[in-house]
Amino acid sequence: MSPLQLGIYLNSQYPEDQDAGQCLADLVGQVKLVETLGFDSIWAGEHHLTPGFHFFPQLALLSHLAAFSGEMAIGTNLVLLPLHRPVDIAEQVALIDLACGGRFILTVGQGYRPEEFDAFGVPFEERLARMVDGIEVIRRLWRESDVDHDGGWFRLRGATVRPGPSRPGGPPIWIGATSDRAIKRAGRIGDAFMATPNDDNTGVRRQLELFASARAAAGLAPAAQTGRMLEVFCHRDGPTARRLARPHLLRKYAAYASWGLTGSAGEAASSAGGAADEDGFEALAANRFVIGDPDEVAAGLVAQYREVGVTHLAMRVAWPGSDQADTLACLDLLGREVLPRVRAVLA
């Protein structure tokens, strides 16, 4: 099993009344801090047309942040691949991979919000076929020259991407999924699996096992990495950590529920009474989030590796409405106290 890598998922969604320029500067400040503290990676996500919020375009944002990322890996979590032309994604990612020295991770998924597909003029029912064909196109463009391709959705004649990515064959392509059928498919066509933050630890462990068994059944070697996006917040005082994170996470998961989130996370989010509902938050966070003082957080991160089976965490420590000072304090505490403890225990 690969060593545990600890990265930061950057919140790029902000209330629409916040100054976008300052929000971007705040993200640069976060990246500069985590780079000095020795984190392993930074990640960003993608959504479009989020009422009441602005959402920084993912690849443009990561391209900007690459200048401040040092030796960290840079990852998408995730690209809504059916919304895009694979040639465009192959070209943009190749350039960012060059900028970060061959440490890019491309994570893709189908998407689930019909309004995003309507806005891009892509039929919602075509998203799976477009994603599968798109992955094949991207891989071929990174590995071959003069590519001819006709997969039913995308057609190429003599296509070559220049400049190509830093590493031979291009970055690994991870796949995010939630249903059993999609996870099995990811095992057959993806280089690694990225679990969402919505399922609990038991559910993520089962997902990783399902992905691994699908790879084995397809005659593929075990994946080098297993990923998970995880809600994390750390403060020297555990109750204060939960108090600071609670309103943001309850609002975030209420939004997920309104977008169609199902399962135990959707049920807990839907039943929570509001941003101050302590019992509702505890039900949502139990066995799912890692929030508390340094001892609690270090133990929770070690458990992600030893008990769940995750080898690369994308830790989300800020959400729409989070205070920059609280975020920086959390990152500093994670970097100076929690990461060294975790790495010492797992060494």
Image (cartoon, rainbow, N blue to C red):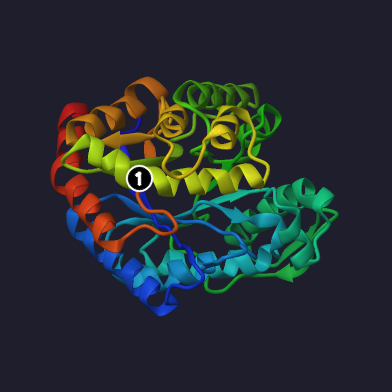
The picture quadrant where one finds residue 210 is top right
Q: Residue at x 45, y 25 (%)?
A: 201
Q: Quadrant of the N terminus?
A: top left
At a point 66% along the width and 51% down the height, the residue shown is 135
| Residue 343 in sight here | no
Horizontally, is 256 left or right of 303 in the view?
A: right
Tell me where residue 220 sits by quadrant.
Answer: top right
**Residues packed near mark 1 inside 10 Å, few (<14), some (14 to 19) or many (20 plus):** many
Q: Position of residue 188 (x, y in %)?
A: 65, 34
- Residues 225 and 181: in front is 181
> In this rendering, does residue 191 appear at all?
yes
Helix, strand or loop for disc 1: helix
> What residue is shown at x 17% (from left), y 47% (from top)?
333
Residue 64 x/y as whole percent: 41, 73
Q: Where 182 falls versus 38 (above or below)?
A: above
Name which residue type carries label 1: Ala
- The percent position of residue 122, horizontal first and vertical second, equals 80, 61
Q: Please, is residue 160 above or below residue 179 in the view?
A: below
Residue with the mark numbered 1: 245
Left or right of 49, for residue 133: right
Percent position (x, y) of residue 327?
A: 28, 56
